[in-house]
Amino acid sequence: MLKVTKKQTESDSFLAESADEIKESRKSRFFHPYLQLFISVVLTAVSQILLKIGVDTQFVSPWYTTSNFFAFWIWLGILAIIGSLFSWLFALKSVPLIIAFNLAATNHIMVAIGSWLFLGETISSQRWIGIFLVALGVFFVGRSATRAEEKL
Amino acid sequence: MSDQSTSTRTRRRLDLAGGVLAMTVGFFTWLALLRRFDLSYLYPFEGIDRVLLAVAAWLILKEKTTRDLWVGVILICIGTAFVAGS
């Protein structure tokens, strides 16, 4: 419990700091923790879609073919992964774990919607049910992880 | 940081290198799988990493587990089975 209160004060001071910064410049609004969390979730879905486009259009077997190392879409996907990782770490500095982990569960639904909208994949109702069950499962696992963290 | 012994630091670097290596292998495996399957079919299987983590934490690290964790693990297993059959 002691750790939680310490974390909260840390996040409070961080929020107070960022509130001052927002007044000073518009740039800091971009670093708002919840915006970063949202960016992280969206970028994760985007990266998967970019990688899928990449392997479908540019990747050729065998894997060591020179052109593979210059595959534009795959590099974009890797950049998106790096971006999502950094914004995730940044958001975790101040967003409570329970909210962050619960939002991470929406990843699965975001990827499904993305692959339906942008890749034109047909998703059967059975697959939708499966995706929602997995997302719900990830949500429960995340909840238990937060509980464990709070007990420390 | 400064009073850290050299062996601890070496150990940490090895851990980090191992982690990076595992992630790289995982990434290329993922690309190979993406070539063969639809993204909406493949992505739910990523949820299995939570199941493996939970079982590893329980068996190897002997951590205490909660009911929520096992509810989540079972839901992920059922969901993945649904997706696999679709």
Image (cartoon, coloured by chain):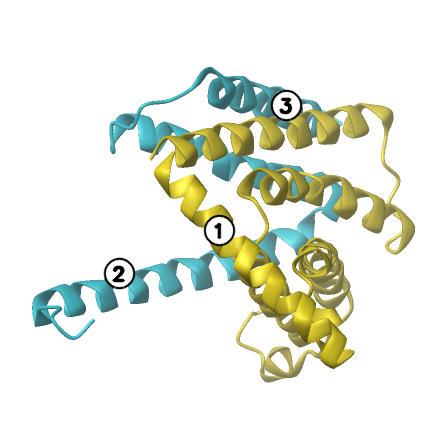
Residue at image coords 85%, 36%: A123
Residue A94 occupies quadrant: bottom right
Q: Nearer the viewer, residue A136 or A78?
A: A136
- Secondary structure at badge 1 equals helix
Q: Tell me if mark 3 has few (under 14), some (14-19) or many (20+) residues whose alpha carbon lies within 10 angstroms of its own.
A: some
Which chain is depicted yellow? A
Residue A129 lies left or right of residue A6; in this view the side is right
Separation of disc 2 and disc 1 at Cα?
A: 32 Å
Q: Which residue is mark 2?
A: B15
Q: Please state the chain letter of the residue tagged with numbered disc 1 in the rendered image.
A: A
2 or 3: tag closer to the N-terminus: 2
Residue A89 - label = none
Residue B72 lies left or right of residue A103; in this view the side is left
Q: Tell me if mark 1 has few (under 14), some (14-19) or many (20+) residues whose alpha carbon lies within 10 angstroms of its own.
A: few
Q: Nearer the viewer, mark 3 or mark 1?
A: 1
Residue B46 occupies quadrant: top right
Q: Give a yes or no on whether discs 2 and 3 share a subunit.
A: yes
Quadrant assignment for the N terminus of chain B: bottom left
Residue B81 - label = 3
Residue type at the position of mark 2 = Asp
Chain B: its colour in the image is cyan
Separation of disc 3 and disc 1 at Cα?
A: 43 Å
Quadrant assignment for the C terminus of chain B: top right
Residue at image coords 83%, 50%: A114
Q: Please state the chain letter of the residue tagged with numbered disc 2 in the rendered image.
A: B
Residue type at the position of mark 3 = Ala
Residue A120 lies left or right of residue B31; in this view the side is right
Res. A87 in view:
no
Residue A9 - label = 1
